[in-house]
Amino acid sequence: MITEAQRRARLDGIGASDAAAVLGVHPHMTPYELWCIKTRRCEQKQILTPEKLRIRNAHEATIANEYAFRHEVKLQRVNETIYHPEHKFLFCHLDRKVVGQKKFVECKSSISWMAKAFGESGTTDVPTEYLIQMLFTFIVTKYTAGDLAALIDIDTFKEFPIPPNQKLMAHIEAQCIHFWNEYVLKDIPPPLETRHDVELMFPVATTVYKQAEPAAVELFTAIDAAYREGTALSDKQEKLKDDFCKFIREAEGLTHGDTVLCTWRPNAKGTRVLRINYGALKPEFAEVAA
């Protein structure tokens, strides 16, 4: 468990748990959100409550003890932050290291509904963000071996040996260096990915509607078509809407001629709510635009 001082210092570089966000594959954070955090434009949102976080931290010792028992090895806590030998803005924290070996153990605890995200024990089938975290740790520490030990639900213990992958590690390292040097240090935001990114950049909508450009009209017709196809395509709809919001930006909505295609106004809580005017365009126009 890292200290409060180490937590604050995480703003000054890219840590192992940040790497998945840099690559755009983190389930809870986009590259733009990470950029906002690192440039101190916003604070990192906490997924777990303090109570749940405290319990997860307590599970770390249980996982480490079980791993040590099964492998008949000694594990050691590593309290200090470890920095990349060349790029000091890349760093990691180890849960445990195996005494006498250049090997680390990452301890993860998870609730039962996350069980499907993990494969069989002994494989490398772990959530993508955990895999990237492990590979990033290899980059920083130069260790030669690492295991991810997971306690799922109450008593399901699994181990996943993650070997170094030099090709993937080179890609991860290059992307993290680029993100820090080109976006954070230059204070230039990375490309927006979701409507939440757009809302972070433009938290307050103006009272002005914008005329939709052709690409936005094309997206609108795709959203309208996905809506008519039914709820089975809800994920597709949401991705289309995320892309659509990149055209709205700070405007209150988009129009096509005199027709309002959508509004994106704040509700009573100040959160902008996207409302699509389904069927606003005539079918014959939608066919041409598509």
Image: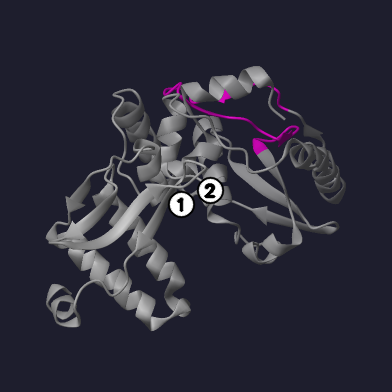
* Above or below 69: residue 98: above
**Could you tell me residue 152's position as x and y percent?**
76, 57
**Labels 2 and 1 touching (C-beta < 8 A):** no
- Residue 84 seen in the figure: yes
Position of residue 24 relative to residue 243, above or below, is: above
Magenta-colored stretch includes residue 146: no
Identify which residue is drawn at 32% across, 71% down: 278
Question: Between marks 2 and 1, how big is the CA–CA gap?
Answer: 9 Å
Q: Quadrant of the N terminus?
A: top right
Q: Secondary structure at mark 2?
A: loop
The percent coordinates of residue 252 (x first, y second) are 29, 47
Q: Is residue 83 at least partly visible in the picture? A: no
Q: Main secondary structure of the magenta part?
A: loop
The answer to whether 203 appears left or right of 122 in the picture is left
Q: Residue at x 30, y 77 (%)?
A: 225
Q: Position of residue 134 (x, y in %)?
A: 57, 44
**Pointer 1: residues within 10 angstroms few (<14), some, or many (20+)?**
some
At a point 22% along the width and 49% down the height, the residue shown is: 209
100 and 141: which is toward the camera: 141
Counting every numbered tag in the picture gives 2
Depth check: 12 or 33 in front? 33
The residue range painted magenta reads: 78-103
- Element type at marker 1? loop
Q: Count residues near mark 2 (Cα–Cα under 10 Å), then give few for <14, some for 14-19, many for 20+.
A: few
Q: What residue did someone put label 1 on?
A: 25
- Please give the name of the residue rendered at 44% of the width and 39% of the height, measured from the top-left corner: 33
> Mark 2 highlights which residue?
28
Left or right, 1 with respect to 253, comes to right
Instruction: Give amino acid for label 1.
Output: Val
Outermost top residue: 5
